[in-house]
Image: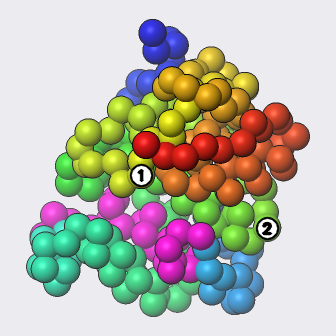
Amino acid sequence: MIPVGAVLGTDELWRYVDQERASLADLLEGLGPAEWETRTRCGDWRVRDLAAHLTIAARFSYGQVVREMLRARGDWNRMIHDSAVREAELPVAEIVANLRSIIGSRRLAPTTSPHEPLLDLLVHGQDIALALGRHRPVEPEAARDAAERVWTMRFPPRPWPLPKARLVATDIEWARGDGEEIRGPVAALLLLLTGRPEAAREWAEHTGEPWTGVTTPR
C-alpha cells in the first residue's frame, strides 16, 4: 500500500514547485562567477547549465521544442542537453530572472506530468548545492512525491536503474522494493533512485540521519 499523501495533489505539487524555484533563485543570485562555472556530478553540466535547464520547460513554446528536436535530430536527451547549454550562455542575471519569471507558471514540457517539474527541481537543486558545498533542505513530502514518481515511471522512460533493495524512509512514511534494506531520509533515497549514490550518502550524513549504504542497481 502506498501511504496516504505519497502522491501530492495538483495544487500542492505546484506550491512546492514555486517554493523550490524561488529558493533556488535566491541561492543562485548570491553566487560568484567561479561558482557559476563549477562542474556538477550531472554528466558534464556546470551549475549554469543546470540552472538554465530548469527554466526551459516553462518558457519554451511547443514550436521551440520542435525546433530544438530538429536540431538534435530527434534525440530527446541530446535536445535537453544542447538546449540547456545554449540557454546557459545568457548572462547569469538573466538566468536567475528567467527562473523567477516562471514562479506561478504551470506550463509543462511535452509528455510530462506535473510531477516532473518538482522532480527536476529537487534533484538538480541538490546537484547544484552539493557541487558548491552547500546544504539545501528538502521538504520530505515533496521528496516522497518525487521518489514515488521515479519508482513508478513508465513514460517518459526512467533513465536510471532501480536499486536491488528495499528502500525505507526514516523521516516520513514511504517504502518500496524488496531485498536488502536501505534506510535513510527520503531526499537521500531520491538521490539514490536517480543514480546519485555518493550524493545520497553525503546528503544523509550532512543531516545527521542514519544511512545504511547503497547496493547495486537492477
The residue singled out by tag 1 in the image is: 160
Q: Does residue 52 belong to the magenta stretch?
A: yes
- For residue 186, above or below residue 9: below
Left or right of 182 on screen, residue 99: left
Secondary structure of the residue carrying tag 1 is loop
Left or right of 103 on screen, residue 185: right
Q: Horizontal and vertical percent for residue 67?
A: 14, 78
Q: Horizontal and vertical percent for residue 194?
A: 50, 50
Q: Residue at x 72, y 33 (%)?
A: 184
User: Would you call the spot at circle 1 few (<14 residues within 10 Å), some (14-19), or many (20 or more)?
Assistant: some
Mark 2 vs mark 1, foreground winner is 1
Q: Tell me the quadrant of the picture where the N terminus can be found.
A: top left
- For residue 182, above or below residue 69: above
Determine which of the numbered discs, if any, sits on residue 36 in the image.
none
User: Would you call the spot at circle 2 few (<14 residues within 10 Å), some (14-19), or many (20 or more)?
Assistant: few
Residue 214 visible to an observer of this rendering: yes
Task: Indicate the amino acid at tag 2.
Answer: Gly
Residue 104 visible to an observer of this rendering: no
- For residue 46, above or below residue 89: above
Secondary structure of the residue carrying tag 2 is loop
Query: Which segment is the magenta one?
Result: 41-64
> CA separation, marks 2 and 1?
25 Å
Q: Horizontal and vertical percent for residue 102?
A: 43, 58
Q: Residue at x 72, y 26 (%)?
A: 171
Q: Quadrant of residue 89?
A: bottom left
Q: Earlier in the sequence, mark 2 or mark 1?
A: 2
Q: Does residue 27 belong to the magenta stretch?
A: no
Q: In terms of depth relative to the viewer, which is nearer, 181 or 51?
A: 181
The residue singled out by tag 2 in the image is: 133
Q: Horizontal and vertical percent for residue 181?
A: 64, 27
Task: Indicate the amino acid at tag 1.
Answer: Trp
Q: Tell me the quadrant of the picture where the C terminus can be found.
A: top left
